[in-house]
Image (tube, helix red, strand yellow):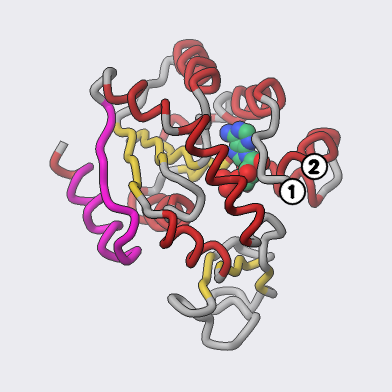
Amino acid sequence: MRIILLGPPGAGKGTQAKRLSKEFGLSHISTGDILRKNVLEVTQLGVQAKDYMERGLLVPDDLVSQMITQRFSQPDVRNGFLLDGYPRNINQAETLEQVFLKENLSIDFVIYLDTSEKTVLQRLTGRRVCSNCGLIFHIKNMPPKKAGICDACLGALYQRNDDNEETVKKRLEVYEKEVSPLLEYYEVRHKLHRLSGDEDAEIVLNKIISLVSAN
Ligand code: AMP
């Protein structure tokens, strides 16, 4: 199964991708996670991407395209994948089509998690992420059993430095301008499925599972 998850920051793409990849044995490809790892490891890509990420802007397409081309040349993608955070504009969607053509792959579902600004702000400013396994918590909606500690691996939880209110607003602006044209792009290709991202993660997960199982 090959799925693209679309939606604003805070729509729950990462949370759903983690659960779905477990449920269906798919590779979770998150361009945000790959970029953050590069920033942490101070690679050449990380150094080039850091400033854009901290300002809530898109990392230039050529850098991200190289990264995604390389990721899709790895054998695990043949067993299916969930793409989370890519594509983020029409140019990236066209690059993806080229990559798929080259690798002989195609997309089964593009799932759009339609989420209100109120939900996004509330979720992102309270989000905490495990520095070890990447599990996502929320200080109110999904608190860890012990404050600051991951339930699954006891790793330390941290707040992403782009999850503050000011940067979130910038990320939402970028989303409106760059990402929302992708809805039409996939709609005319008959791939787009819309679901509400405002509902609880469990409900959204079940709706996605019903959708992919019925098609
Ligand atoms: P995310 O974890 O998906 O919210 O991404 C965090 C940040 O990484 C974004 O605000 C961008 O700066 C950068 N980023 C992630 N994916 C992409 C992409 N496909 N194109 C450009 N920048 C990206």
Q: Is residue 112 shown left or right of residue 132?
A: left
Q: Mark 1 near mark 2, Cβ–Cβ under 8 Å?
A: yes
Pinpoint residue 82: horizontal percent, then vertical percent. 43, 40
Local packing at callout 1 (Cα closer than 10 Å; few below 14, some 14-19, many 20+) is: some
Badge 1 residue CB within 8 Å of ligand 1: no
Q: Is residue 30 shown left or right of residue 158?
A: left
The residue that label 2 is drawn on is: 51
Asked if the stretch drawn in magenta spans residue 156, the answer is no
Residue 110 figure quarter: top left
Residue drawn where x is 53% and y is 65% of the image:
136
Residue 205 figure quarter: bottom left
- Look at the image and give the residue range highlighted in magenta: 191-212
Q: Amino acid at mark 1?
A: Glu
Please tell me in which quarter of the rendered image ligand 1 is found. Answer: top right
The residue that label 1 is drawn on is: 54
Q: Is residue 140 shown left or right of residue 56?
A: left
Q: CA distance from mark 1 to mark 2?
A: 5 Å
Asked if the stretch drawn in magenta spans residue 210, the answer is yes
Closest to the observer: 24 or 124?
124
Pinpoint residue 43: horizontal percent, then vertical percent. 84, 39
